[in-house]
Image: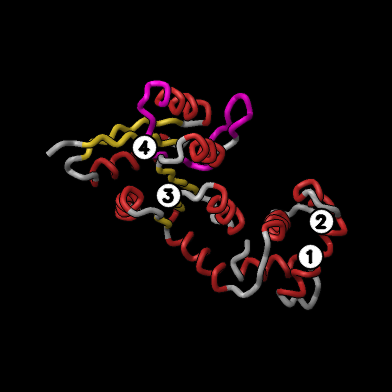
Amino acid sequence: MKSSTLKILMVDDHPMIIEGYQHILLATKKEDQILDIDVATDCDSAMSAILKSKNMGQPYDMYFFDISIPQSSDGIYKSGEDLAKHVRLTQPEAKVVILTMFNEVYRIHSIIKTINPDGFLIKSDLTSSELASAFEVIQTNPPFYTGTINNIIKRSIFNPIEVDEINHKMLHFLSLGVRTKDLVAHLGITLSAIEKRKKNLKDLFVIDDGKDDSLIKVAKEKGYI
């Protein structure tokens, strides 16, 4: 039986985590499969590996990007999310897998919309068997989302209230403690437009006391934050 080689780049700033992922993939790969796995711990080393592989005419087939990694020295790539966007633009045929500890609804929706990853894995969801299953599905019939991602998507589909991207961002920043007057810089709209959007959301979510804290609480309960 002829062997096939799968070139993989794993990007995470925790070597122990990368080592664990490697062991699981090597232990569960197909018998006729050879895994050629490289690792990187920040945006600079990741971009160096990406460019080197392409220049050698042997680009990676699959990428695992942790979101929270040190940014590049030139400031162009600030996270694994930026690296994933770069790969999507320059190598659309490659499989892109996102790994993160983040579970904020807005952030997850944003990543799905901008990157549309072949795998989206919340680290706290992962077990050895889950990662092995993800690896198989990502190769043959993507996408693979872990439980937290699937639950967020289901809540969004079945929730009757329409919340657009700007409102998602606004709720996200409010939940982080950003003051209303400071949202102008984050959202790129006027203060009066922000106040109007907040009022509309409070009406939609039936916030009787009109408080921002109550809006955030209900938005979290409904899966918007």
Residue kind at label 1, given as amino acid type:
Lys
Q: Quickly name the residue at label 3.
A: 118
Residue occupying the point 41% across, 39% down: 63
- Label 4 and label 2: CA atoms lie apart by 44 Å
Q: Do the residues labelled 1 and 3 touch (CB within 8 Å)?
A: no
- Label 1 and label 3: CA atoms lie apart by 35 Å
Q: Quickly name the residue at label 4.
A: 61
Residue kind at label 2, given as amino acid type:
Thr
Q: Are marks 2 and 1 in contact (CB under 8 Å)?
A: yes
Q: Residues within 10 Å of mark 3 (few under 14, many from 20)?
A: many
Q: Quickly name the residue at label 2.
A: 180
Q: Is residue 28 left or right of residue 130?
A: left
Question: Is 73 part of what is drawn in magenta?
Answer: yes
Q: Of the residues under marks 1 and 3, which one precedes in the sequence?
A: 3
Q: Quickly name the residue at label 1.
A: 198
Q: Nearer the viewer, mark 1 or mark 3?
A: 3
Residue occupying the point 32% across, 39% down: 22
* SS category of the residue bearing label 2: helix
Residue 129 screen position, x and y as percent: 30, 54
Residue 68 seen: no
* SS category of the residue bearing label 4: loop
Q: How crowded is mark 4: few (under 14 residues within 10 Å), some or many (20 or more)?
A: some
Residue situated furthest right in the rendering: 192
Q: Against 14, is 160 above or below?
A: below
Q: Of the residues under marks 1 and 4, which one precedes in the sequence?
A: 4
Residue 100 screen position, x and y as percent: 49, 48
The N terminus: image quadrant: top left
- Label 4 and label 3: CA atoms lie apart by 12 Å
